[in-house]
Image: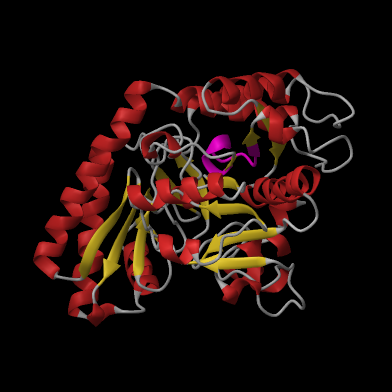
Amino acid sequence: MSDKISVTRDLFDEVMVPNYSPSAVIPVRGQGSRVWDQHDNEYIDFAGGIAVNCLGHCHPNLVKALKEQGEKIWHLSNVMTNEPALRLAKKLVDNTFAEKVYFANSGGEANEAAFKLARRWALDVHGEEKTQIISFKQAFHGRTFFTVTVGGQPAYSDGFGPKPGDIVHAEYNNLDSVKALISEKTCAVIMEPLQGEGGIIAPTTEFVKGVRELCDQFNALLVFDEVQTGVGRLGALYAYMDLGVTPDILTTAKALGGGFPIGAMLTTTAIAKHLKIGTHGSTYGGNPLACAVGEAAFDTVNDEKLLAGVKAKEALYREGLTAINDKYKVFSEIRGKGLLLGAVLTEQYQGQAKAFLNAAMDEGLMVLVAGANIVRFAPSLIIPDEDIQAGLARFEKAVAKMVNA
């Protein structure tokens, strides 16, 4: 049946809900950091499925895990546990601050679990007055109604009726704005250890340590959303490890499955005990197929040489982007860390990030945006240096076209 259906971009408009506006390009296969479309045009992938494909496309370790587990058992229910879930949980616990793991299917679900746990912990330990959640303007934490409200971008949360209450937003990298909001009624402060969708903004040491101290002072939990920054993206297994600050709850997804949907919430035993039997759940969370692939991805990334390579590749990107900018003067700043980088457009090119993305696609390069003014790069953590150079050459052609348009 499927062979008889003509699959074109027009079919999207015919059969799909219109909340996305995908490119005309329909990729059909990928290998490493390269992708081919229906017409066999080749693209270098600097987008990584929005920081998901941490090992590129069709990495042999992930393919092997998927095939092997696919012939064993795919799904049970949480009435039972399974070996891949327990192995992956053990590795997450052994390699982080955490003592307990809850599996979900996405970053949004992991954050939903984190926020519910924070509220339940506060209710049980401190009473029903302690419900306030502090987040940050321009933050992004998912698309469920709870997580999108906690996220600091009203454009995503407005228009759906009354929002979950007692959620306030401070300014990222402004400790005084947190001090102005936090009190004994605060149950949690939730932050990305580097803002992704909000503009690739790294925290200052003073800010992140100050937030930790305020949480301790007011008996609030510090929740780190590491959905985008985790699993090697910034050059450490998890970003908190380079910041000298340990959260109480951490969420992880995206790269955790290397492209297969999986998410997890990590926390301590003392906090985890408040999600008692029946207080939260997920039909697919912790299914054996996802966890088997997740284990393979985690094992591959959790390697000193690979993580050191992320920082070396960051330097290569910065060098190449700076060289392009010296010639064309389109960026005011190259910011970010590891392989989550943003090229900030100058005043002259404000609002044109999507146009740069489209120009890059025309040159055979996949990039991302972070808002209207930033071109974002989140490639495979093991992208070969020659693919970085080749991709930057294509990007330079796109920039030249934008400048000379």
Left or right of 3 on screen, residue 218: left
7 is higher (above) or lower (below) than 209: below
Identify the residue at image location x=38%, y=69%.
358
Q: Nearer the viewer, residue 143 or 27?
A: 143
Percent position of residue 396, x then y: 20, 61
357 is higher (above) or lower (below) than 271: below
Number of marks in the image? 0
Can residue 366 be seen by looking at this rendering? no
Percent position of residue 227, x then y: 54, 46
Is residue 256 within the magenta segment?
yes
Left or right of 132 on screen, residue 325: left
* Quarter of the rendering occupied by the C terminus: bottom left
Identify the residue at image location x=39%, y=33%.
236
Q: Which quarter of the picture shows residue 168?
A: bottom right
Colour setting: secondary structure
Identify the residue at image location x=85%, y=43%.
279
Report the span colored magenta: 253-265
Left or right of 218 on screen, residue 74: right
Q: Nearer the viewer, residue 22 or 97?
A: 97
Can residue 349 be seen by looking at this rendering? yes
Left or right of 166 on screen, residue 65: left
25 is higher (above) or lower (below) than 345: above
Q: Nearer the viewer, residue 203 or 343?
A: 203
Percent position of residue 230, x then y: 48, 40
Identify the residue at image location x=35%, y=22%.
304
Percent position of residue 32, x then y: 41, 36
